[in-house]
Image (cartoon, rainbow, N blue to C red):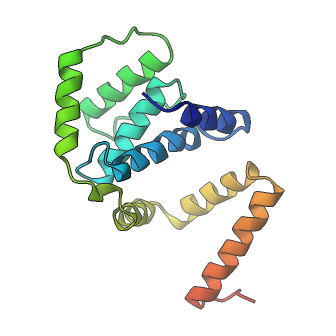
Amino acid sequence: MPQKQTIARARRDKRQGKAPTTQAGEFVREEVHRIRRGAHGARSPQQAVAIGLSKARRAGVKLSPPGKAKAKKSTRRSAAYAYAAGQGRRKPRQRPRVSRAVSRVLKREPRGAASRQALGRQARRAASRRSASARSAAARKAVRTKGAAARSVAARKAARTRARRGKRGAR
């Protein structure tokens, strides 16, 4: 069950016109914190993200299941089930035994999946699969819902990064 403040943050993102993936990001963030606190573990950063996305779908975020080329059949089915439950189209069955079994298995998994290094590796790998133009388009889209103050902070951060890496355009 997601925390109230996570749901509130996701709702605020929705009001601000941000994408469903951004809204779902709040749930992923919560999941990473749960792993770091030691509530349970995950085998990989991808699993931590998947748990967060599933919680987001169940909480009603309009994050549609992945397409045919994006994920395997069982993942798509699971995502579709969570999505339907979150949109009120399906009554989720409570299965205490299955729930307990999943909890026990997750408790045995390592906690390193939510470390900064592991998440950084995953982020770089995911970004490298996208073209430069796709990454640029995503950044431009993000700017549209950022607001002046946040944009200013982001620009300063980008300038610091450029200066640190010795990239051209740094003043």
Nearer to the camera, 75 or 122: 122
**Quadrant containing the N terminus in the rendered view:** top left
Quadrant of the rendered image containing residue 85: top left
Q: Where residue 139 sits in the image (x, y, percent)?
A: 64, 59
Quadrant of the rendered image containing residue 122: bottom left
* Residue 65 visible to the viewer: no
Left or right of 39: which side holds 147? right
**Quadrant containing the C terminus in the rendered view:** bottom right
Please, is residue 137 above or below residue 97 in the view? below
Left or right of 17: which side holds 70? left
Task: Find the residue positioned furthest to the right.
Answer: 148
Please, is residue 27 above or below residue 169 in the view? above
Q: Where residue 81 sits in the image (x, y, percent)?
A: 36, 20
Quadrant of the rendered image containing residue 161: bottom right
* Number of numbered discs visible in the structure rendering: 0
Q: Where residue 138 sits in the image (x, y, percent)?
A: 60, 55
Q: Where residue 134 sits in the image (x, y, percent)?
A: 55, 58
Nearer to the camera, 72 or 25: 25
What's the residue at 73%, 39% (across, down)? 16
What's the residue at 31%, 10% (across, down)? 93
What's the residue at 37%, 64% (across, down)? 125
Nearer to the camera, 170 or 150: 150
Please, is residue 135 above or below residue 84 in the view? below
* Residue 166 visible to the viewer: yes
What's the residue at 19%, 21% (across, down)? 98
